[in-house]
Image (cartoon, rainbow, N blue to C red):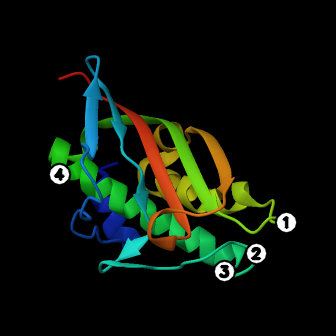
Amino acid sequence: MDCYEKMRELGIKLPPPPGKGGIYSSVRKFGDRFYYTSGVGCKKDGKPLFTGQAGKDFTVEQGQEAARVCVLNLLSNIEAELHDLNRIKRFIKILGFVSSADDFGQQPKVIDGASRMLIDIFGEEAGCAARSAIGVNNLPGNQAVEIELLFETEAE
């Protein structure tokens, strides 16, 4: 299925690519068909959707929403690079960082928001990636979540 059609069915609209916070490439190709993205936070309309630490300043459910926003921002960056998200064959790895209170241990549940979004848009086979969900003390701009992706494209 066409991923743009699926996004329309789900009522999902990609935002403009988020601005960069430093000197780096947003998306970098390696090998013939693999790409790695730089980490992207949960900014919506230029402002963090949620800030602070999970278990203290925001809930698991709010963290899941922040993770979904990260995915939309990442897809926007990927689209700017590939010009067509339908070129994606599969997602290989999700690396998710969750700003967490010392006693918070539900980072995998937060990053489930990102995994679910990719599966909903690209299907189980292409969207279900290997994954790490890591708790950190703080993220740039005090954002709740930051995510990186590794993915493969179809042969050209």
Q: As rendered, which of 154 and 23 lies closer to the eye?
A: 23
Q: Which mark is residue 55?
A: 2
Of tags 4 and 3, which is closer to the observer?
Answer: 3
Left of 39 or right of it: where is 131? right
Residue 121 vertical position relative to residue 11 in the rendered view, above or below = above
Residue that carries the numbered disc 3 in the rendered image: 58
The disc, 1 or 4, on the residue closer to the chain's N-terminal end is 4
- Give the mark, 2 or 4, whose residue is nearer the N terminus: 2
Q: Residue, x 36% and y 45% (percent of image)?
A: 38
Packing grade of label 3 (10 A; few <14, some 14-19, many >=20) is some
* Left or right of residue 106, residue 45 in this image: left
Q: Position of residue 145 (x, y in %)?
A: 54, 64
- Under mark 1, the amino acid is Asp
Name the residue type under label 4. Ala
Secondary structure beneath dot 3 equals: loop
Q: For numbered disc 1, what is the local secondary structure? A: loop
The mark nearer the N terminus, 4 or 3, is: 3
According to the picture, the residue beneath numbered tag 1 turns out to be 103
